[in-house]
Amino acid sequence: MPRSALHRGVKAGTLGFEDERFSYVAAATSRWPRAGGRVLRHPRGRKGLVSLRVCTDEDGVRGVTVSRRHGGLYRLARDTGWGDAWPRTGEYGGETC
């Protein structure tokens, strides 16, 4: 697969091409419910606080900070990883972040 100059810079590559070992296609005959958002980066966790970078349809890219006070939402954020679905504001047990 050919690489552009931007692609080489982002991935710190030196070659003008990249060999992709795997490719995947996900197909379904019915529509799946869309996620409220997707986590763009690995969540940053500190004591009692989780910071997420989330992409949503309504807001675009935004930062979400969830503290231990949010209870169940905090536990969900703590166990969330890069690429996971993230609920919309107010979608999880009436709690907002």
Image (cartoon, helix red, strand yellow):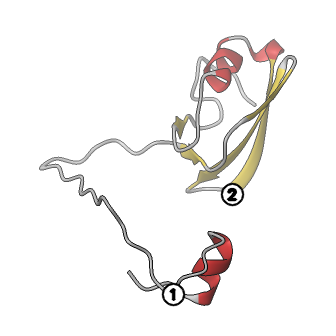
Q: Which residue is mark 1?
A: 16
* In the image, farthest residue toward the front: 14
Q: Which mark is residue 32?
A: none
Which residue is more in the foreground, 42 or 32? Answer: 42
Q: Is residue 14 left or right of residue 70?
A: left
Pointer 1: residues within 10 angstroms few (<14), some, or many (20+)?
few
Quadrant of the frame with the N terminus: bottom left
Give the residue displayed 61% in from the left and 80% down from the top. 14
* Side (left or right) of 1 relative to 68: left
Q: In front: 36, or 53?
A: 53
Question: From the viewer's perspective, is 1 left or right of 52?
Answer: left
Say which quarter of the image contains residue 23: bottom left
Farthest residue to the left: give it. Answer: 29
- Where is 63 relative to 70, above or below? below
Q: Nearer the viewer, residue 9 or 38?
A: 9
Identify the residue under disc 2.
61
Q: Secondary structure at mark 2?
A: strand
The three-letter amino acid code for the residue at tag 2 is Val
Three-letter amino acid code at disc 1?
Gly
Placement of the C terminus among the 4 image quadrants = top right
Quarter location, residue 94: top right
Q: Residues within 10 Å of mark 2 (few under 14, many from 20)?
A: some
Find out whether the residues at labels 1 and 2 contact each other: C-beta distance under 8 Å: no
In space, the residues marked 1 and 2 are separated at their CA atoms by 30 Å
Query: Viewer-nearest of labels 1 and 2?
Result: 1
